[in-house]
Image (cartoon, coloured by chain):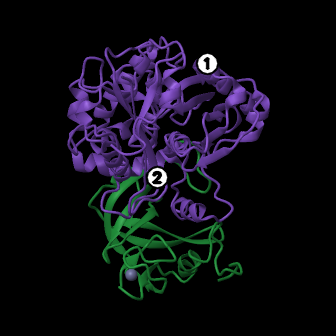
Chain colours: A green, B purple
């Protein structure tokens, strides 16, 4: 963590519910929350469990592989930090949770529902990030 | 029927012109629309005692109230979620009147969306509010515009239903066909073809430029009073037969990617269930509709969620011409937000009022009950309006 902020990461807009996810990326780990009461996994961070309402949870690293559930390719207007066209995929990870990731570096024509992908950790300027690549 | 049904009515509406550059302040637009609505209803501005709008509206209640010569404002309220909120302020007005909190409520939305800011730009998510940290989490992947967010949902819809961009062209063309005969519409005199749609550039594949709504300057206001009062006023009362909000389990604002169905669907279905229960009406009782079209393709799951056709069958319903006047459910006869203007759906509410009064430019004959919906893919709202 060369220049990570006091929060332990440099992601631009986070709070104490989301910090663990971005800190995980600094260590090249893709973290989700596991409910300490009912073991339900959740990828989109939240202080509480949608299934049982428990506020107790622990971070769980994902293995990093999954299958494309949906995707979109951004063309317009220009995006800060990404060239267009910019594909993104909503991926059902093998652990069962969905995760949205960039697929820059992949031809948009090669992105398809049902395709197997694997996480790749990247740095975007001083921010630890990730994207998906086709397997 | 429940307590809210038919107890209140839209007694008047007002609107500015819709443009790409209004040349005046947003507050001025709000005041013009409000005064227009009051004049339409035949109510003196001094009688207004309630105001309801969108949290995204930049015009404060008391400043509009000062400018119209208001006397005693007792009720003011705001609804979040941008275009998802459209019918929320209408519901607020109805509840305030039914409970005796207010008697004459103005619902308004006015913006210089095109000339002063543009919603389609990449979002800059600060400060870290509970919604902004989610927008930033998705923005981290490059998902930064409403078009891309809805595009991600619609891609899955296409995969599951077999709907294609050519199906979406049918709605894009129809919206401009209606708009082409509406002098208030951006597409007035400018119909488009399927080929125009298919060759328009990608914005967020699968969404093309001609699938996207307008970016507009303009204002719309409604005046809502009790049904009893409305019957003594100059216009035919447009009764609020039902008004509901919908945000079921798993709903995230423009980011509901983690539930069983990621289509822009569940929140609409939740609002629809309440509307039909409140009003005692069913989809078959509705003669026409305003289906929110921030992006034209979302009309397809919208038709399904509100019960006009089964899941996945909207593409055939649309192809068979049922959205045209003479079809089973004419929709968006003003041209929708693709063809007329984008005022967060309030111009669609105004169109419903005209249709029900029988004064629309593309009039559906004999309309008695209409559904009006709000933005999908986020917490939403909807209403059923009707005339005797
Ligand atoms: Zn739990």
Picture coordinates of residue B172 (x, y %)?
A: 38, 27
Please give the residue where the numbered disc 1 appears in the rendered image. Answer: B42
Picture coordinates of residue B303 (x, y %)?
A: 30, 38
Give the secondary structure at mark 2.
loop
Which residue is at the front of the view, A46 or A65?
A: A46
User: Seen in the image, is B110 located left or right of residue A50?
Assistant: right
Please give the residue where the numbered disc 2 appears in the rendered image. Answer: B379
- Quadrant hosting residue B287: top left
Picture coordinates of residue B105 (x, y %)?
A: 61, 35
- Which residue is found at the position 41% from the left and 84% from the top? A35
Position above or below: B186 against B283: above
User: Seen in the image, is A59 located left or right of residue A127?
Assistant: left
| Badge number at residue B239 | none
**Chain letter, disc 2 residue:** B
- Which residue is found at the position 48% from the left and 22% from the top? B231
Comparing labels 1 and 2, the label whose residue is closer to the camera: 1
- Please rate how many residues cluster around mark 2, counting C-alpha atoms within 10 Å: few if below 14, some from 14 to 19, many from 20: many
Residue at disc 2, CB closer than 8 Å to ligand 1: no
- Which residue is found at the position 36% from the left and 19% from the top? B193
Which residue is at the front of the view, B323 or A106?
A: B323
Q: Visible in this render: residue B24?
A: yes
- Which residue is found at the position 54% from the left and 50% from the top? B81
Q: Reading the chain from its start, which is encountered first: label 1 or label 2?
A: 1
Quadrant of ligand 1: it is: bottom left
């Amino acid at each position: 963590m060369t220049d990570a902020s006091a929060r332990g990461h440099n992601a631009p807009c986070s709070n104490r519910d989301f910090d663990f996810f971005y800190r995980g990326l600094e260590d090249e780990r893709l973290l989700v929350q596991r409910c300490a009461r009912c073991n339900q996994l959740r990828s989109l961070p939240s202080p509480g469990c949608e299934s049982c309402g428990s506020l107790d949870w622990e971070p769980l690293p994902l293995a990093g592989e999954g299958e494309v559930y949906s995707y979109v390719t951004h063309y317009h207007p220009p995006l800060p930090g990404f060239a267009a066209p910019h594909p993104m995929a909503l991926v059902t990870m093998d652990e069962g949770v969905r995760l949205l990731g960039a697929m820059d570096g992949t031809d948009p024509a090669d992105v398809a529902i049902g395709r197997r992908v694997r996480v790749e950790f990247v740095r975007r300027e001083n921010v630890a990030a990730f994207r998906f690549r086709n397997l | 029927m429940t307590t809210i049904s038919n107890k209140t009515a839209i007694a008047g509406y007002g609107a500015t012109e819709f443009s790409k550059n209004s040349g005046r302040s947003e507050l001025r637009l709000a005041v013009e629309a409000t005064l227009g609505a009051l004049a339409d209803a035949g109510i003196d501005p001094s009688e207004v005692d309630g105001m309801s709008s969108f949290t995204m509206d930049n015009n404060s209640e008391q400043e509009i109230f000062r400018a119209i010569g208001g006397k005693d404002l007792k009720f003011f309220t705001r609804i979040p979620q941008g275009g998802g909120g459209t019918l929320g302020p209408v519901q607020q007005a109805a509840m305030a009147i039914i409970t005796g909190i207010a008697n004459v409520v103005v619902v308004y939305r006015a913006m210089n969306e095109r000339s002063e800011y543009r919603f389609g730009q990449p979002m800059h998510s600060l400060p870290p509010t509970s919604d902004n940290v989610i927008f930033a989490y998705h923005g981290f992947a490059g998902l930064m515009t409403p078009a891309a967010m809805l595009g991600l949902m619609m891609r899955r819809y296409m995969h599951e239903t077999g709907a294609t961009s050519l199906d979406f062209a049918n709605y894009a063309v129809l919206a401009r066909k209606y708009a082409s005969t509406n002098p208030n519409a951006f597409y007035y005199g400018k119909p488009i073809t399927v080929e125009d749609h298919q060759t328009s550039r990608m914005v967020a594949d699968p969404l093309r430029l001609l699938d996207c709504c307008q970016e507009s300057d303009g204002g719309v206001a409604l005046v809502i009073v009790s049904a009893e009062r409305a019957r003594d006023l100059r216009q035919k009362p447009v009764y609020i037969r039902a008004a509901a909000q919908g945000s079921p389990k798993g709903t995230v604002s423009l980011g509901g990617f983690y539930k069983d169905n990621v289509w822009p669907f569940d929140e609409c279905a939740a609002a629809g269930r309440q509307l039909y229960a409140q009003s005692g009406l069913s989809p078959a009782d509705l003669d026409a509709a305003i289906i929110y079209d921030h992006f034209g393709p979302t009309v397809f799951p919208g038709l399904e969620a509100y019960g006009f056709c089964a899941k996945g069958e909207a593409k055939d319903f649309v192809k068979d011409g049922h959205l045209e006047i003479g079809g089973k459910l004419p929709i968006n006869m003003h041209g929708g937000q693709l063809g007329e203007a984008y005022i967060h759906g309030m111009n669609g509410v105004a169109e419903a009022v005209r249709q029900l009064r029988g004064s629309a430019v593309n009039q559906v004959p004999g309309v008695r009950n209409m559904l009006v919906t709000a933005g999908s893919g986020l917490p939403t709202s909807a209403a059923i309006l009707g005339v005797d």
